[in-house]
Image (cartoon, grey):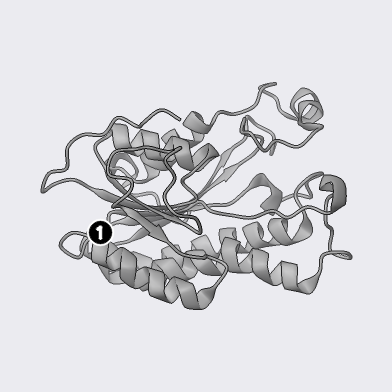
């Protein structure tokens, strides 16, 4: 992957903490914010990868397991140590898991093992609120924002996304409203984006049928289009937007 262009950090450089940065929407988000001069601190269960060589990536990476609440507590301290002047301008909770059954089969409410359900909720739901709560003072100091990445699957039964994934995203949408209410008095805005069918390397077979029959725009979205909306929600132009969930799906939800 090509390196993201990034301006040299200054005293006024904004800082983004991003989970799930190594591919797809996350990687496009790194490139978008990097091009705008932001400093990006990435979070992943894996060590920093040379496949994603954005400037400063190695020293601005925190390795932690979002499925492990104990590890998140340790990770918050590591993230805090990488922030400048105790300020954080934006937290984007993008990382998520969507397990499949044998042969890529959708796992429904009847056949999803409960331990797998717990793992999905740990990553997709509990990690975002733990990170936001753990970094609330730094977000408040910068009058920063949180963006939670939900999904179209959180509001309708999806042919590919399993029940654990879908319900975790629905819960994250509700959490976004609760956080906007509770974090707002501290000067922190909280919003969500809900992508639909986005052109990534992990599209399920049969997606072309959804595009042809259910999406009015008759095409997939791009990761750059999603990253642009995330960037908008973290900049001054959205300074009075909070508690919103923006649909990014070409009209698929209508």
The answer, for residue 233, to whether it is visible in the render is: yes
State the residue position of label 1: 143
User: In the picture, residue 209 is in which quadrant?
Assistant: top right
Q: Residue sitting at 28 percent across and 54 percent down? A: 89
The answer, for residue 178, to whether it is visible in the render is: no
Q: Residue sitting at 55 percent across and 69 percent down? A: 126
- Taking 63 as reference, is 222 left or right? right
- Residue at the far left in the pictured view: 11
Q: Residue sitting at 34 percent across and 49 percent down? A: 240
Picture coordinates of residue 234 (x, y %)? 34, 46
Q: Residue sitting at 88 percent across and 64 percent down? A: 111
Picture coordinates of residue 20 (x, y %)? 50, 50
Quarter of the image with the C terminus is top right
Decide: is 6 above or below 124.
Answer: above
Residues packed near mark 1 inside 10 Å, few (<14), some (14 to 19) or many (20 plus):
some
- Taking 62 as reference, is 248 left or right? right
Q: Nearer the viewer, residue 179 or 198?
A: 198
Decide: is 78 above or below 229.
Answer: below
Decide: is 196 above or below 116.
Answer: above
- Taking 119 as reference, is 179 left or right? left
Decide: is 136 above or below 153.
Answer: below
Picture coordinates of residue 249 (x, y %)? 62, 34
Q: Nearer the viewer, residue 180 or 77?
A: 77
């Amino acid at each position: 992957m090509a390196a993201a262009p990034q301006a040299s950090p200054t005293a006024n450089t904004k800082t983004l903490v991003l989970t799930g940065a190594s591919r797809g929407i996350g990687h496009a988000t790194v490139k978008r914010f990097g091009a705008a001069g932001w400093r990006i601190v990435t979070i992943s269960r894996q060590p920093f990868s040379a496949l994603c060589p954005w400037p400063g990536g190695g020293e601005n990476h925190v390795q932690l397991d979002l499925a492990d609440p104990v590890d998140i507590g340790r990770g918050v301290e590591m993230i805090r140590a990488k922030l400048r002047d105790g300020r954080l301008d934006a937290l984007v909770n993008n990382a998520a898991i969507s397990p499949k059954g044998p042969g890529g089969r959708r796992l429904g409410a009847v056949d999803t093992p409960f331990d797998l359900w717990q793992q999905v909720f740990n990553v997709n739901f509990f990690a975002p609120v733990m990170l936001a709560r753990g970094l609330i003072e730094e977000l408040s100091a910068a009058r920063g924002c949180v963006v939670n990445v939900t999904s179209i699957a959180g509001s309708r039964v999806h042919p590919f996304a399993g029940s654990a994934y879908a319900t975790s995203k629905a819960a994250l949408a509700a959490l976004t409203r609760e956080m906007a209410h509770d974090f707002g008095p501290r000067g922190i805005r909280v919003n969500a984006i809900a992508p639909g069918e986005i052109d990534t390397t992990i599209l399920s077979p049969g997606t072309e049928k959804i595009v042809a029959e259910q999406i009015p725009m008759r095409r997939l979205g791009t990761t750059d289009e999603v990253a642009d909306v995330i960037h908008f929600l973290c900049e001054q132009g959205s300074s009075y937007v909070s508690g919103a969930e923006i649909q990014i799906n070409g009209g698929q939800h209508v």
